[in-house]
Amino acid sequence: MRKIILFDTKESHTKLLPLTYTRPVAEIRIGILTIFQKWQRTGHEIKMHSQSYFYHPLQIKTNDVCLFVDATVCPTRVLLDLLTNLSHTESIICDGQTIAFVGTLEEYESENYLLFNSWKIAARNLLKINHISDVFSKNDEALRHDYEGLTFGKTSAPLEANCTEIGDNLFLEDGASAKGAIFNTEEGPIYIAKGALVMEGAMLRGPIYIGEHAVVKMGAKIYGATTIGPYCKVGGEISNSVFFGYSNKGHD
């Protein structure tokens, strides 16, 4: 098991403002999970290195060798295969930018990693957030990727008989509740987390994620690719939107 450090660059922090005023880049949600949560699912120890006003010290020795990954990059199968074979003083570059390297904290802080031997990866093999617009334009891809990983080998909780399901890509966690709603998954999957409530008359057309303890109000019309984060309350018509946690848009 490797120790992975998700680091913010000055460029990514600036390009992703105002979202990064209040969170490290890795805490941006795209798809079902935040970028940090996606990396946690790889089974490695994950830490973040971001702006000093909202991150905890790394608490690693300056000569400890770690895997550093640009926090704008989500883990994909192609990338993970490359990272497995990456050795100390080696890096991965995409479009002239270092997106990952194996080195020490000292090499990171001094930017000596920019001189490491590098491998190149094509942008098409990455799921990377370069601009705020990518949170929306790439949300469809991220939703499908997360859905596949989270539902693999699992069985959905039953859907109540008073609901209508079109397609077969609906997954409800235990404790999710839906009453009198319509779910269409022919264009993409729908994932309903535990404690979430989808009220009567709501119509959902995937791909969509409804987070833990979120509420979809009566008669809501939600189109993909949409992410409703935990503890959100939404209503009316919504399309290709990403709600971070504890956000509300309950009106029509």
Image (cartoon, helix red, strand yellow):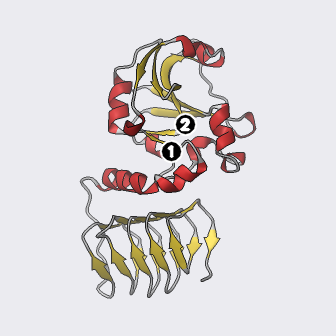
Quarter of the rendering occupied by the C terminus: bottom right
Give the Cα separation between the discs numbered 2 and 1: 7 Å
Q: Say which amino acid is labelled 2.
A: Ala
Residue 43 visible from this viewpoint: yes
Query: Around disc 1, counting alpha carbons within 10 Å, would you say few (fewer than 14), some (14 to 19), or many (20 or more)?
Result: many
Query: Around disc 2, counting alpha carbons within 10 Å, would you say few (fewer than 14), some (14 to 19), or many (20 or more)?
Result: many
Of residues 83 and 42, the one nearer the viewer is: 83
Q: Is residue 133 left or right of residue 10?
A: left
Q: Position of residue 196 (x, y in %)?
A: 47, 71
Farthest front residue in view: 95
Q: Say which amino acid is labelled 1.
A: Ile
Q: Is residue 66 above or below residue 161?
A: above
Q: Position of residue 43 (x, y in %)?
A: 39, 36
Q: Position of residue 27 (x, y in %)?
A: 58, 46
Of residues 30 and 97, the one nearer the viewer is: 97
The disc at residue 183 is none
How many numbered marks have been drawn onto this rendered protein structure?
Answer: 2
* Residue beneath the point at 53% across and 70% down: 214
* Label 2: element kind: loop
Label 2 close to label 1 by CB (< 8 Å): yes
Q: Earlier in the sequence, mark 2 or mark 1?
A: 1
State the residue position of label 1.
35
The disc at residue 71 is 2
